[in-house]
Image (spheres, rainbow, N blue to C red):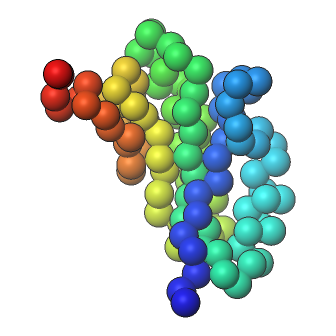
Amino acid sequence: MPPLNVLIQINISDEQSKSGIVLSELPALAEAVAALPNLCLRGLMAIPAPEHDYQRQLATFGQMNDAFQELKLRYPQVDTLSMGMTDDMQAAIAAGSTMVRIGTRNFWRP
Protein backbone atom coordinates (compact mmCIF):
# COMPACT_ATOMS: atom_id res chain seq x y z
CA MET A 1 0.00 0.00 0.00
CA PRO A 2 1.43 3.44 -0.91
CA PRO A 3 1.90 6.07 1.77
CA LEU A 4 -1.14 8.13 2.70
CA ASN A 5 -0.94 11.75 1.53
CA VAL A 6 -1.46 14.19 4.41
CA LEU A 7 -1.70 17.92 5.05
CA ILE A 8 -0.82 19.60 8.32
CA GLN A 9 -3.64 21.81 9.57
CA ILE A 10 -2.58 25.22 10.83
CA ASN A 11 -4.82 27.19 13.21
CA ILE A 12 -3.69 30.44 11.60
CA SER A 13 -6.16 32.63 13.49
CA ASP A 14 -5.57 30.92 16.86
CA GLU A 15 -9.28 30.20 17.28
CA GLN A 16 -10.45 27.98 20.13
CA SER A 17 -13.17 26.57 17.86
CA LYS A 18 -10.67 25.33 15.25
CA SER A 19 -8.23 22.46 15.24
CA GLY A 20 -4.66 22.59 14.06
CA ILE A 21 -1.29 23.68 15.30
CA VAL A 22 0.22 27.15 15.58
CA LEU A 23 2.89 28.04 13.02
CA SER A 24 5.71 27.82 15.57
CA GLU A 25 4.96 24.08 15.98
CA LEU A 26 5.18 23.38 12.24
CA PRO A 27 8.89 22.47 11.91
CA ALA A 28 8.73 19.80 14.63
CA LEU A 29 5.47 18.26 13.41
CA ALA A 30 6.61 18.29 9.78
CA GLU A 31 9.79 16.47 10.76
CA ALA A 32 7.82 13.88 12.73
CA VAL A 33 5.35 13.30 9.88
CA ALA A 34 8.12 13.09 7.27
CA ALA A 35 9.82 10.36 9.33
CA LEU A 36 6.76 8.10 9.22
CA PRO A 37 7.05 5.62 6.33
CA ASN A 38 3.29 5.24 5.81
CA LEU A 39 2.64 8.98 5.47
CA CYS A 40 3.61 11.41 2.71
CA LEU A 41 3.62 15.04 3.76
CA ARG A 42 2.03 16.97 0.89
CA GLY A 43 1.47 20.39 2.42
CA LEU A 44 -0.61 22.65 4.62
CA MET A 45 -4.24 23.58 5.12
CA ALA A 46 -5.97 26.32 7.06
CA ILE A 47 -9.40 27.78 7.67
CA PRO A 48 -8.90 31.26 9.12
CA ALA A 49 -11.38 33.21 11.18
CA PRO A 50 -14.12 34.85 9.10
CA GLU A 51 -12.93 38.18 7.74
CA HIS A 52 -14.68 40.36 5.18
CA ASP A 53 -11.82 42.78 4.51
CA TYR A 54 -9.86 41.57 1.47
CA GLN A 55 -6.52 43.04 2.62
CA ARG A 56 -6.80 41.32 6.01
CA GLN A 57 -7.71 38.05 4.30
CA LEU A 58 -4.68 38.45 2.05
CA ALA A 59 -2.39 39.12 5.03
CA THR A 60 -3.54 35.98 6.84
CA PHE A 61 -3.22 33.83 3.74
CA GLY A 62 0.18 35.39 3.09
CA GLN A 63 1.42 34.01 6.42
CA MET A 64 0.32 30.57 5.28
CA ASN A 65 2.07 30.94 1.95
CA ASP A 66 5.29 31.98 3.69
CA ALA A 67 5.15 28.82 5.83
CA PHE A 68 4.33 26.74 2.73
CA GLN A 69 7.33 28.10 0.81
CA GLU A 70 9.66 27.32 3.74
CA LEU A 71 8.22 23.81 4.01
CA LYS A 72 8.76 23.19 0.28
CA LEU A 73 12.45 24.03 0.64
CA ARG A 74 12.93 21.23 3.15
CA TYR A 75 10.47 18.68 1.75
CA PRO A 76 10.44 18.63 -2.07
CA GLN A 77 7.28 16.51 -2.30
CA VAL A 78 5.24 19.30 -0.67
CA ASP A 79 2.95 20.76 -3.34
CA THR A 80 -0.39 21.56 -1.71
CA LEU A 81 -1.54 24.70 0.08
CA SER A 82 -5.23 24.27 0.85
CA MET A 83 -6.95 27.45 1.93
CA GLY A 84 -9.95 29.43 0.81
CA MET A 85 -13.68 28.90 0.78
CA THR A 86 -16.64 30.74 -0.70
CA ASP A 87 -16.18 34.05 1.14
CA ASP A 88 -12.39 34.31 0.93
CA MET A 89 -11.29 32.23 -2.02
CA GLN A 90 -10.16 35.20 -4.15
CA ALA A 91 -7.69 36.31 -1.47
CA ALA A 92 -6.59 32.71 -0.90
CA ILE A 93 -5.87 32.18 -4.59
CA ALA A 94 -4.05 35.52 -4.82
CA ALA A 95 -1.90 34.44 -1.86
CA GLY A 96 -0.93 31.13 -3.48
CA SER A 97 -3.58 28.56 -2.60
CA THR A 98 -3.32 25.44 -4.74
CA MET A 99 -6.57 23.90 -3.47
CA VAL A 100 -9.78 25.64 -2.41
CA ARG A 101 -12.81 24.07 -0.78
CA ILE A 102 -15.93 24.81 -2.76
CA GLY A 103 -19.60 24.41 -2.03
CA THR A 104 -22.89 24.92 -3.75
CA ARG A 105 -22.70 28.68 -3.10
CA ASN A 106 -19.86 28.84 -5.63
CA PHE A 107 -21.73 27.21 -8.50
CA TRP A 108 -25.35 26.61 -7.72
CA ARG A 109 -28.02 28.22 -5.63
CA PRO A 110 -31.08 26.10 -4.79
- The answer to which image quadrant residue 31 occupies is bottom right
Residue 65 visible somewhere in the drawing: yes
Q: Position of residue 35 (x, y in %)?
A: 77, 78
Q: Is residue 101 left or right of residue 106?
A: right
Total residue callouts: 0
Q: Is residue 62 above or below residue 13?
A: below
Q: Is residue 92 left or right of residue 25?
A: left
Q: Position of residue 105 (x, y in %)?
A: 26, 25
Q: Nearer the viewer, residue 21 or 68?
A: 21
Q: Residue furthest bottom?
A: 1
Q: Position of residue 66 (x, y in %)?
A: 59, 44
Residue 23 visible somewhere in the drawing: no
Q: Is residue 102 above or below residue 14?
A: below
Q: Residue furthest front?
A: 110
Q: Is residue 56 above or below residue 29?
A: above
Residue at 63 percent of width and 59 percent of height: 71
Q: Residue furthest top?
A: 53
Residue at 75 percent of width and 51 percent of height: 26
- The answer to which image quadrant residue 84 occupies is top left
Q: Position of residue 63 (x, y in %)?
A: 60, 35
Residue at 55 percent of width and 33 percent of height: 47
- The answer to which image quadrant residue 107 occupies is top left
Q: Is residue 80 above or below residue 91?
A: below
Q: Is residue 45 left or right of residue 13?
A: left
Residue at 49 percent of width and 50 percent of height: 81
Which quadrant is the N terminus positioned in? bottom right
Which quadrant is the C terminus positioned in? top left
Q: Is residue 109 left or right of residue 35?
A: left
